[in-house]
Image (cartoon, grey):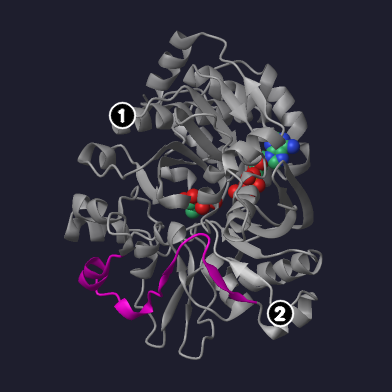
Amino acid sequence: MTPRSFAAVDLGASSGRVMVARVGEDELTLREAHRFPNRPVRAGGTLYWDVLGLYGHVLDGLRAADGVASIGVDSWAVDYGLLDPAGTLLGNPVHYRDDRADGVMDKVVAELGAQTLYDVGGLQFLPFNTVYQLLSAPVPEAARTLLMIPDLLAYWLTGEAGAEMTNASTTGLYDVRAGDWAYSLIERLGLPTGIFPPLRRPGDVIGTLRPDVAAETGLPDALPVTAVGSHDTASAVLAVPAEHDRFGYVSCGTWSLAGVELDAPVLSEESRVAGFTNEVGVGGTIRYLRNVMGLWLLQESLRTWRAEASLPDLLAAAADAPAFAALVDPGDQAFLPPGDMPARIAAYCARTGQRPPEGRAAVVRCILESLALGHRAAIRDAARLSGKSVEVVHIVGGGARNALLCRLTADACGLPVVAGPVEATAIGNALVQARAHGSAVEPRELVRRTQDLTVYRPRGDDAAWDRAARRIGLS
Ligand code: ADP
Ligand code: LRH
């Protein structure tokens, strides 16, 4: 097959990009058409995504993506917009770190029972899951269609409304066994059943560009927009360059999504209590994983210090800082909202009888060791609860550039870590498009053959890591 190019629109919580991926039998190259920061905006006390600003950047990126055979869109999960009968967006999508749904999850769980909910959606109980956001206030009378963020952008590009299933599976309103919206749960919760649009699979063609979008971007109006694993983590996991199926993964960016890939969900009570999610993957797989707080801890510390530019220096200093001085449980929900992260880390340490880290390097060391322990616990628990054996851990996403975190994760897990690709999400997005448009490439094999990967081997000292894990109550 002659190589072809595909535009992968990938919106992460910290930045967005439009990448042009050239895909051939032995070729996979990426060109960054446009990269832009994703800055949430607080207005009137509510934290929003700047969704029109992001869409404007997507159009800018597409303008620099001429020659592509198709476009695919992915983004973070759980958030949504509501359309009125005319297809107009009702209100600005709210950020999952806003506090509007605080307390809703506990009420729903008290009413319906945790296992009833888990048995349908199979999701880790996170306060911002779509279901709790939707129940935080009455759904506006005028709402006719709920669109998850990537589906909203695809709607603006094509005029076609639908719900791509990997991201639908993050709502808590999707029946992970039936592979459909969980209509009886939706009814029981008193939510309008009619707002959930038809489901799409990765690889389905959504439509072609609206004429005004074609005119604005200079792209042909017959250009297809193709459904991909529109949940960014689904696209990232597809691009894990695994050689065999005995692997664990950490999709590591703002969040660390750490777990294994399965053929079927694990919906046991033990799995629920252990905080595991069963999200739908590309090709009908199950991403059995735990949300670990991820590099958010570091991003938010850098923002507090106004030190974003000094990340490389801080990482170098953290590599020389004393080991296991202070540790936090990276799953602690106190770290979820925006705000002074070093202060919350210090408060956690004080609460747990540890001396708070002194100085920035010590804080960064604390964050990275704690994350490595979070990765270890998630991978080990996922393997134990699913029966899957794990011989290697793949780290993909921006975190693959953090050599110290990769090394600590290898040491903590006692397993080799293969780091890369950094742009796994955009790659997974593009490879679904390539396959939908006639390519026979095997995604993981192509990524393995073409991308730069770094291997970190564990350096022993399992006993020290075991002791460290026990200090924060992790396995
Ligand atoms: P998201 O998709 O959630 O926005 P990314 O996968 O883009 O996240 O990863 C962003 C993270 O990658 C940053 O928070 C940062 O910690 C890490 N990162 C980016 N560049 C570097 C770098 N040069 N060295 C170390 N870490 C990096
Ligand atoms: C990562 C991610 C993750 C979700 C979170 C809200 O970007 O999609 O998989 O849990 O955002």
Q: Is residue 139 visible?
A: yes
Residue ranking furthest to the bottom: 86
The correct choice, above or below, for 108 with respect to 412 in the image is below
For mark 1, what is the residue? Answer: 387
Judged from the image, the quadrant occupied by ligand 1 is top right
Specify whether tag 1 is near ligand 2 (CB below 8 Å). Answer: no
- Provide residue 455's location: percent of width, then percent of height: 64, 22
Q: Answer few, some or many: residues within 10 Å of disc 2's Cα (few below 14, many 20 plus, some between 14 and 19).
A: some
Magenta span includes 3: no
The correct choice, above or below, for 227 with respect to 141 in the image is above
Q: Answer few, some or many: residues within 10 Å of disc 1's Cα (few below 14, many 20 plus, some between 14 and 19).
A: few
Place residue 307 in its image quadrant.
top right
Identify the element where label 2 is drawn: loop
How far apart marks 1 and 2 lie (CA) works out to 49 Å
Q: The magenta stretch spans which residues?
A: 181-208
Q: Amino acid at mark 1?
A: Gly
Residue depicted at x 41% and y 14%: 467
Q: Amino acid at mark 2?
A: Asp
- Provide residue 163's location: percent of width, then percent of height: 45, 69
- Provide residue 256's location: percent of width, then percent of height: 52, 40
For mark 2, what is the residue? Answer: 221
